[in-house]
Amino acid sequence: MANNIVEFNYLKPQWEAIKNEVNVEFEKLYETSDFILGPKVSEFERNFAAWNNSKYAVGVSNATDGLEIAARAFQLEERKTAVFIPANTFIATFIGIYKAIPNADYYLVDCDEYFQLNVSVLEMQLAKHATTYEEIVVAPVHLYGCTSDMNRLLELRTKFGFKIIEDCSQAHGAISSSDNPVGTDGEIGVFSLYPGKNLGAMGDAGVLTTSIDDYYNRLLSLRNLGSVKKYIHEHFSGNHRLDSIQAIVLDIKLKFIDKWTDQRIETANRYQSEIIHSDLINFSNPSYCKKNVYHLFPVRVDTRDEFQKYLSDNGIPTIVHYPITLYNSKSLLDFPFKYRRENPLSDEYCKTVLSIPMHPFLTKEQIDYVINTINKY
């Protein structure tokens, strides 16, 4: 088996770009010892909100915790609630929201041909079930760097009166059909800042966005054991704080993210125009996504195991993302999802999708090699 000629994701060059400035800020931090929710966290929050065109940003421990406190901010514990989430997503989307509102009914919505929440299916489910509930939450996931169809979702929100939590964990800076960055159309946006994300920390981290004052004030409390003033706990919550070390790294990386995103887009454009193989369905961009930031680059191939081995033997690493739908996850087999078996595209894609290398530091020669190797399969 060949050694890797291409890295699937390559984080070391990010450190090379930021380390001098980071080390200076670390020295200052050790002098002040403001390690938890210090000034550097507030500075990162202000800068991220401005970059994302949001009124507020709230740094948190990770995106799963972020989804939990976002759902808690709606205060739905005593309301009859339905939650609609994609069947084709990482399990954290469900777990985070479920921890906040375990008594809700959870509906799984199939994906469309671009892997995003199928808004037409959602509309049919809402038309059938919305009047049964006092409150409804819809949680679109902007998967792989592509956006959901936010224009249609906003139309449905007007029609059915639901709340939106946007899971933006793979789509930092993506722009949807609404012409807005992800995380600004819903009531609350949730971003993972896991190291491998387009904007990644040196450990677990996340950030929430909102432009609604009441939600912002609750989020500040909910991330810190329900407290914004020491020993005064107004809400039931856990410890979901962001530390200053992660905030320093993230704030400095934020200066580079637009450049790094442009490099991802350049690579994706080459993949889309130059990978031509009758056995592959390439990752194309829907009209409802104005800017895809290509966190991942998935292709679909029926002979996935054979194809993956072929690439590995030629030094190209790949990853299978989401090979098990939520309702087939061992931990959720007995969970009473609504319409858990009516997700044909999600079932198909979990068997055929494979992600090929995508990061900002692929060289022209490496991109050429990936394209030519795939085309020779």
Image: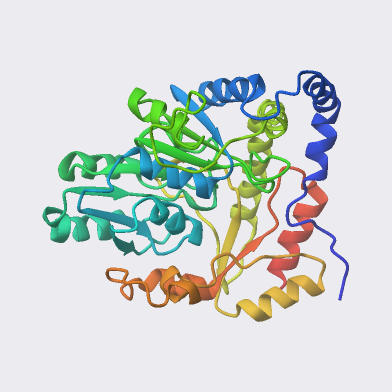
Percent coordinates x, y for residue 90 in the rendering = 51, 60
Residue 329 or residue 68, whichever sits in front? 68
Q: Answer with left or right where residue 335 lies relative to residue 45.
A: left
Percent coordinates x, y for residue 337 in the rendering = 32, 69
Q: Quadrant of the C terminus?
A: bottom right
Whether residue 96 can be seen here? yes
Q: Picture quarter containing residue 264?
A: top right
Question: Which residue occupies 54% across, 73% down?
Answer: 352
Q: Picture quarter containing residue 320?
A: bottom right
Outermost residue to the left: 131
Q: How many marks?
A: 0
Question: Which residue occupies 40% across, 70% down?
Answer: 345
Q: Picture quarter containing residue 354?
A: bottom right
Percent coordinates x, y for residue 130 in the rendering = 16, 54
Residue 46 or residue 127, whichever sits in front? 46
Please, is residue 259 above or below residue 162 in the view?
above
Please, is residue 176 above or below residue 310 in the view?
above
Whether residue 291 can be seen here? no
